[in-house]
């Protein structure tokens, strides 16, 4: 049986550990950015593009919930990598009062690629309940003024690499038939989409390349050796990292830069730096 002193010591130690863990999940990990470096093998990649660097950012969530200083620091870190291509896969903001002016201030300093800066929209970029195309149109203009081209079910060409960008699934703007129909299947391609659930929908037809996406934040909190308890997707296996899909497709889910609630545990925020390779 514990003595009174032992009980008090154990209680104090437990309380201190709980406070320390709470402080870590709130103050430390949400801003402890990880630069994940990995190869991106692409079939048919033009030889001149082998070795180029592609930076992938997602779920930045400019707004009241995410520190402006943290976002600016992230932008500076990515710019210092001197990427050849920078892609963004949606949720540029979290809607709220003054968000357009806030986005204009923050995204004028967004990191750009030497060859191209491309992005797609996420559900939060469509305003409340993902139901306001006029909000998405305004954000598209703000990002264009900052040097980014937003792809809305269309394809861009970057030195012979096709980049296919899908519009958002939850906002009912996802139209893979239109985007895939604009691809030349004999040439190298990658795809951008915000929500990984969209990869399970029909319409991808003969697309066999990589799909880069975000949306999940990796779950934000993940107990050791267990899946994250909360994920905003139907397909619960879509957490973070690489996934093999049907149709000879591969998907990479980025854990995201920002958050909706300032809490992360065992799921650090991420920027992915890919090195392009000939598959």
Image: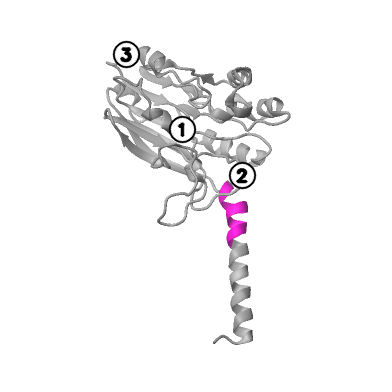
Residue that carries the numbered disc 2 in the rendered image: 261
Numbered badge on residue 184: 3
Q: What's the distance in space between the residues labelled 3 and 2, CA to CA?
A: 41 Å
Query: Which comes before the other along the chain, label 3 or label 2?
Result: 3
Query: Disc 1 to disc 3, how far (Cα)?
Result: 24 Å
Marks 2 & 1, CB-CB < 8 Å contact: no
When the figure is inspected, residue 21 is found, relative to residue 149, above or below; the finding is below
The residue pinned by badge 1 equals: 55
Residue at 35% over, 29% down: 210
User: For the residues carrying marks 3 and 2, which lies nearer the camera in this image?
Assistant: 2
247 sits to left or right of 139 = left
Estimate the x, y position of residue 43 in percent, counting from the top left. Answer: 27, 25
Q: Left or right: where does residue 191 sit relative to residue 172?
A: left
Above or below residue 60? Residue 126 is above
Mark 3 residue element: loop
Q: Main secondary structure of the magenta part?
A: helix
**Viewport quadrant of the N terminus:** bottom right
- Asked if residue 116 lies in the magenta stretch, the reply is no
x and y, in percent, of residue 269 in the image: 52, 44
Residue 79: image location, x then y, percent: 54, 33
- Between the residue at mark 2 and the residue at mark 1, the CA separation in whole angstroms equals 25 Å
Task: Please tell me which residue lies in front, 36 or 172.
Answer: 172
Residues drawn in magenta: 21-30
Q: Residue 265, relative to residue 175: is it above or below?
A: below
Q: Are marks 3 and 2 in contact (CB under 8 Å)?
A: no
């Amino acid at each position: 049986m514990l003595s009174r002193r032992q009980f008090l010591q154990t209680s104090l130690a437990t309380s201190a550990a709980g406070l320390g863990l709470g402080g870590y999940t709130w103050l430390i990990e949400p801003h402890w950015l990880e630069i994940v470096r990995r190869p991106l093998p692409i079939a048919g990649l033009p030889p001149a593009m082998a070795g180029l660097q592609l930076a992938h950012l997602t779920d930045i969530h400019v707004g009241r919930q995410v520190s402006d200083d943290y976002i600016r620091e992230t932008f500076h870190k990515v710019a210092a990598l001197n990427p050849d291509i920078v892609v963004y896969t949606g949720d540029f903001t979290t809607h709220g009062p003054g968000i357009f002016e806030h986005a204009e201030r923050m995204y004028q300093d967004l990191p750009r690629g030497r060859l191209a800066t491309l992005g797609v929209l996420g559900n939060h970029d469509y305003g409340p309940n993902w139901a306001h195309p006029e909000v998405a149109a305004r954000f598209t203009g703000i990002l264009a003024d900052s040097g980014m081209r937003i792809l809305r079910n269309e394809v861009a060409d970057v030195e012979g690499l096709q980049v296919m960008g899908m519009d958002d699934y939850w906002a009912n703007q996802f139209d893979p038939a239109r985007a895939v129909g604009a691809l030349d299947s004999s040439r190298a391609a990658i795809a951008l989409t915000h929500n990984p659930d969209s990869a399970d929908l029909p319409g991808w037809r003969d697309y066999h390349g990589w799909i880069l996406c975000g949306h999940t934040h990796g779950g934000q909190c993940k107990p050791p050796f267990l899946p994250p308890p909360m994920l905003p997707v139907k397909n619960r296996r879509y957490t973070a990292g690489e996934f093999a899909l049907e149709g000879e497709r591969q998907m990479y889910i980025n854990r995201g830069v920002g958050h909706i609630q300032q809490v992360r545990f065992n799921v650090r925020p991420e920027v992915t730096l890919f090195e392009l390779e000939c598959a």
